Image (spheres, grey):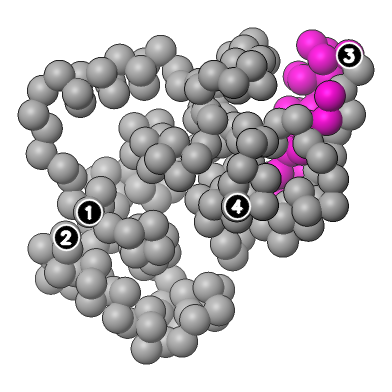
């Protein structure tokens, strides 16, 4: 059994490895600290399960997830995040993730999640499962940020984190003009007037730390 852990914090990777090694005695582990390293390791090796951090420098975990699913569509990917589940989980599951859990989860929950996704199932916490069921049973108006494309959603979070357009362009390897176009689209789709309103909305809805 081979498990790849991708997180930009070495301490987090070590902690996850210790939790899983205690349960999966014969498991082999690989580590990646960023998106590029993760994709390279997925290309070069076979993995039975990948644990992928949602928030990494540069390319987001969501974009890395999509690349992994193109390269190795059958490998289960368990997303791990510090963000509130209901804001990110549905987006990740739609993109092909086999499971989603927060970093605050108990160790036994991580072990259970890995077992579930490796057996072909999908994992979400009981609290999130209940929330998703309630979404299906009642007519809930789509929140503004759910109308955004994945790239627009990423740019929204970067704007709300206080990053200038030039910095966002550099981090995403895009032109300033392209980022400005994304910003205009985000404002149109969310019905907001400026970056200050976007930032306020993102903070209110826990889309940024």
Which numbered circle lies on residue 190?
2
Query: Residue tagged by mark 1?
Result: 147
Query: Residue tagged by mark 3?
Result: 25
Q: At x 20% / y 19%, what residue is drawn?
A: 134
Q: At x 45% / y 44%, what residue is drawn?
A: 95
The earlier-in-sequence mark between 1 and 3 is 3
Q: Quadrant of the N terminus?
A: top right
Looking at the image, is mark 1 or mark 4 nearer the viewer? 4
**Label 1 secondary element:** helix
Dot 4, crowdedness within 10 Å: few (<14), some or many (≥20)? few
In space, the residues marked 3 and 4 are separated at their CA atoms by 30 Å
Tag 3 near tag 2, CB within 8 Å: no
Which numbered circle lies on residue 70?
4
Q: Quadrant of residue 180?
A: bottom left
Tag 2 near tag 1, CB within 8 Å: yes
**Label 4 secondary element:** helix
In space, the residues marked 1 and 4 are separated at their CA atoms by 24 Å
Q: Position of residue 40 (x, y in %)?
A: 78, 57
**Label 2 secondary element:** helix
Task: Name above or below for residue 155 compared with residue 46.
Answer: below
Q: Quadrant of residue 160?
A: bottom left
Magenta region: 1-25
In space, the residues marked 2 and 1 are separated at their CA atoms by 8 Å
Q: Position of residue 93 (x, y in %)?
A: 44, 36
Task: Name above or below for residue 58 compared with residue 51.
Answer: below
**Label 3 secondary element:** loop
The earlier-in-sequence mark between 1 and 4 is 4
Asked if residue 20 is among those painted magenta in the image, a careful observer would answer yes
């Amino acid at each position: 059994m081979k498990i790849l852990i991708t997180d930009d914090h070495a301490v987090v990777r070590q902690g996850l490895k210790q939790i899983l090694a205690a349960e999966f005695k014969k498991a082999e582990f690989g580590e990646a600290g960023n998106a590029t390293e993760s994709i390279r390791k997925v290309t070069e090796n076979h993995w039975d399960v990948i644990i992928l951090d949602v928030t990494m420098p540069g390319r987001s975990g969501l974009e890395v997830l999509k690349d992994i699913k193109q390269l190795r569509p059958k490998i289960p990917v368990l997303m791990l995040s510090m963000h509130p589940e209901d804001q990110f989980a549905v987006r990740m599951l739609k993109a092909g993730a086999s499971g989603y859990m927060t970093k605050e989860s108990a160790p036994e929950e991580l072990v259970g999640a890995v077992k579930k996704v490796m057996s072909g199932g999908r994992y979400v916490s009981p609290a999130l499962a209940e929330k998703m069921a309630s979404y299906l049973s009642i007519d809930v108006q789509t929140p503004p940020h759910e109308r955004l494309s994945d790239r627009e959603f990423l740019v929204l979070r970067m704007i709300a984190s206080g990053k200038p357009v030039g910095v966002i362009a550099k981090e995403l390897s895009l032109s300033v003009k392209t980022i400005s176009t994304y910003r205009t689209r985000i404002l149109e789709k969310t019905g907001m007037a400026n970056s200050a309103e976007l930032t306020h909305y993102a903070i209110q809805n826990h889309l940024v730390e």
